Image (cartoon, coloured by chain):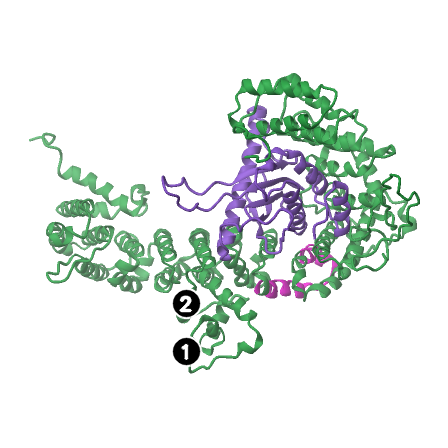
Amino acid sequence: MVRAFVLLALGGPDPPAPPGPAPPGPAPCRVLYARAFGTPPGSPPATGGPPRQRLRRKEQLLAVARQVASQCRLLQSSSGRPSSPQLPQLPDEPISLQDAPGGLFQLPPGDPFPERVTVAWLSVLALAFALVCDPRENLSLAEVTLRRLAPRLLASLRLLGPGADVLLRPETADLLLDRLLPHGQMLFLNERFLRAMDREMGIKPSR
Amino acid sequence: RPGSRRPLPPAREIQEEELRRFASRVAALLQGPELGPEAVDCLQRLHLTVAATKYPRKLDGKFVELLQTVLCSSKCPEQIQVLCAAILREMSPCNDLILSCDEIQDTKLLSLVSSVLLAQGNKKAEVSAVGQRIVKVLERRLPEGQSAQYLLPVLSNVISLSPESLTEEQTNVVSRKMADWLRYASIQQGVAQPSGGFFSNPRTRQPGPVTEVDGAIATDFFTVLSVGQYYTQDQWLNVQAFSMLRNWLLCYGGKGLKTPNSDDKSGMDRSVMSVVCTTSTSSRLLPPKERLREKAFEYCQRLIEQSNRRPLKKDDGDLQKACLIEAVTIMDIICKQDSSYMYRAASFLKILHGRICGDATYARALLPIAQFFLNHSKMAAVDSDAIYKHLFTDIPAQLFHNPSLAFEFVQFCKDNSQLFTETSSIFRQSFPNLFKFLAWNSPPLISEFVDLLPFLLDAGTAIEIFHLLLDLPCLTAALDIQLRSTALPTSERAASDPAVKPATCLEAFRHPLYKSMFQYLLRTKSAPEDAPERLIPLRQLLGSLASSPRVVQCAETVPVLLELFFRVVAEFADGPLINQLVVLLLQRSDQLYEIPAFKDDVYRVLSSQLVMLCKLHPALIVELSKEILEFSGTVSNIQNKEAIFTHVVWAIGEYMSVSYDKRCTVEQINRFFETLEAMLFEITQLRPLASTSSYAPRAISVLMATLTKLAARSQDLIPRVSMFLSKMRTFVQSPAVTSVYCEEDLEEILIRATELMNLLKMPSVAQFVFTPPVDVASTQFQREVNDSLPFALRIVTHLLEPAPGCMPG
């Protein structure tokens, strides 16, 4: 099962030095949208009540985002790619995921989830998408799922254009996830099935 | 900030009063006749406000109730429902929840409401309640227009959160349905939903059969790899059912109840010789669990066959591979739960392995296949050694640069760590290959290797792994060159002229002078190297890659692994091994890849670990006196390897004593004394014409201290040391020295010299201080190098120079 999905803005490398006071440092990554599918197994009983549980959930997801941002940065630098994102494409241009950086890593038990989890991530320009999976999950399917979620989320939420629409349209992301990752269940959908699903959601094929 | 609407104040800063007013406005809208764009807009802002803070926002209990009512209202547009659910989930866990799934008939709404209930943390057994409701709905025939496809994912989530939610009877109900969905979905394509309207043709076209991914007409029952333009309900259920099949079988397929992640080793109750052949006529008589198992097995077989087809759409290829991996994994689970499937599975998978083992794009699928044979080969009596050999010898060497494969391969090793303990096994022998994954993909794999390394390490592999760790960044560089060399067209790959020195690393790869060195570094099997200095030219050659980002990332993992290495080795190493390691440690300190930060970090780790080894085996100072004398007598070591030098000298002072080794003679002590005295002389010499170079102050301190300690044990030396120490005042005050050392350091040196001189005025005390009985746990001497001596000295100095007025008479 997928325990959570996170969509994050990667934050930046050091911005170019403007005249005036020195910038505070690289912009931290930000969680733009996150969805947890139930309380992670092994969670201690609710000490401190609901606010504490909610806080724990938010902190866990932020911790995942930070790790993804860090892994992404390290991967970019190891492959010699420029760390600053390229200019955003026109919103209508099909997004090529061909060379999109991505990877897999584990988070140990207790940090931040009670049990060990594996994170699959994919990065497009200044954003990243991450699936928090059980350790024995089918990671090939996780990567396929990310490659399907990313362009659809980018298009529906107009993430590449100006404005932070995603923060104000959680239902759009929710509806997409309800189809492609319902309740955290990854689906073995072939291309035609996916097309049929797109049709139902009213997404035009972009190819 | 949103661009399409008027700018909002940051959501975090919205005050409680303002929020309350806003909520009232939203409530008014929600209770109004029509829920239009304004309601959507407000709900979206409300969601943002609630989500933006880490501490929960207080919303009126009545308002929260209203949200739940709106969510469940059938007249409400879907967008509004989804937004209400999102807000409720964002606030979860929530005390004001009155939601219940008991009365909801609409499956889509049930799914949405379940998402809120499952986010409550299961304090009130919400998970079980949802599970019960879902099964109840699934049991009965669904009303027209309702589909079970929205319910299966909820069920899957329920059982992964809390498998005890369902009774055995309920799991049987679902198992029965799943078997049908998996096996008997229609193989005709679905029809387009009629669009209606004036010009639409009421006669729908006759749908054709579904096809395989390569376009051929479907040859057998419907699976996730079946293709059509439109899909029927039962075909959707087929996809859903397969997607949750593994989880379901793990939970309920074996004897009794198992949680999804536990290892199910039960079910081996059928005898080896009974091969139960179930035909489709008799299968209807099987109990639900067994029937599902049978259908699942057939489904997996079909998927594996279907994965052999070349897909028309490239992306279907990725799905084929994911399906293949899933199918093999499920077969493995089935065989664990019912060993009568073993023979069919084993022969089938052997053939599959033969088919894909030469195809690099299928490499990840080799792992579950190997896992299957590891789990079952004893029973299946299949010779699977060739499979393991190929997996461990060829795959890492060819595909180390594939990060997903690297990750999964290392997980596989961790899952099967017991394999590495057998000395002669192919797994153990292949550890040099495994490190290639780490060398190339350091950031995601370092923590995995921290877990794995202890299993690779024992008395037989320690030395080789020591060298390997120190050369890990070189391995990265060599792999880079190997990749580039393989990418060259064959025409450019001519072997270089042996007489001409290679101009680039790439040329050197095939040059006879360097070829064997590369081959050693890139070896796939363990091969202890007797002469590690043989790689020196290669390290120098690879120096041009020392600043490449990947090499640097790899270098950063080495200190962590080295510390772990020594921690593990300390548990089993005997005297001879420790000696060997110390000798190599000193030797390799000259033979490190030239990355400045890397060398400093390695020196730091090696020096502290040296101390640890001395504590374990103090006699090594005497046993290795030749090597240690040589090391401590080389002046350049004080500059180039200060950390190691300082700790070596400290160790000499500490352990060169008859208390630690009866073989320690006066001659040896004197020999060490002379060597170290010469070193101290060298670095504190004031040359009138040449400029003074500065050395690490702690090196000076530790030399003085060690000389004092040695003199305390061989008291003829005391006058020499005292005289030397008295000269330190001149040294510290000379202008040539004050210009290159900082004032605090010089003061510290002088204080130390004075303390040591005072100590030597009372030789018997000095002896006591510096030669503690070995069997007494004298913890103050086990502190850091720089702390232990001052503590002892200050006590003694305090005794020797009491505060004025304290001493009687």
Foreground disc of the pair 2, 1: 1
- Near mark 2 (Cα within 10 A), the count class, few <14, some 14-19 or many ≥20, is many
SS under mark 2: helix
Q: Position of residue B414 (x, y in %)?
A: 58, 52
Q: Is residue B381 magenta?
A: yes
Query: Which portion, as a residue range, is magenta?
Result: B368-397
Q: Position of residue A40 (x, y in %)?
A: 62, 36
Give yes or no for contact between labels 2 and 1 (Cβ–Cβ under 8 Å).
no
Residues B282 and B206: in front is B206
Is residue B272 left or right of B632 when viewed as pictured?
right
Q: Is residue B587 magenta?
A: no
Amino acid under label 2? Answer: Arg
Q: Position of residue A82 (x, y in %)?
A: 49, 54
Q: Which chain is green?
A: B
- Vertical position of residue B699 compared to residue A167: above or below: below
Residues A189 and B357: in front is A189
**CA gap, disc 2 and disc 1:** 15 Å
Residues B143 and B416: in front is B143
The residue tagged 2 is B539
- Near mark 1 (Cα within 10 A), the count class, few <14, some 14-19 or many ≥20, is few
**Secondary structure character of the magenta stretch overall:** helix
Residue B472's tag is none
The residue tagged 1 is B501
The answer to whether residue B323 of the structure is visible from this angle is yes
Residue at (74% x, 28% y) in the render: B129
Amino acid under label 1? Answer: Lys
The hue of chain A in the figure is purple
Q: Given the image, what chain letter belongs to the residue carrying mark 1?
A: B
Chain-order first, disc 2 or disc 1: 1
Instruction: Give the image quarter of residue B67.
Output: top right
Instruction: Give the image quarter of residue B306.
Output: bottom right
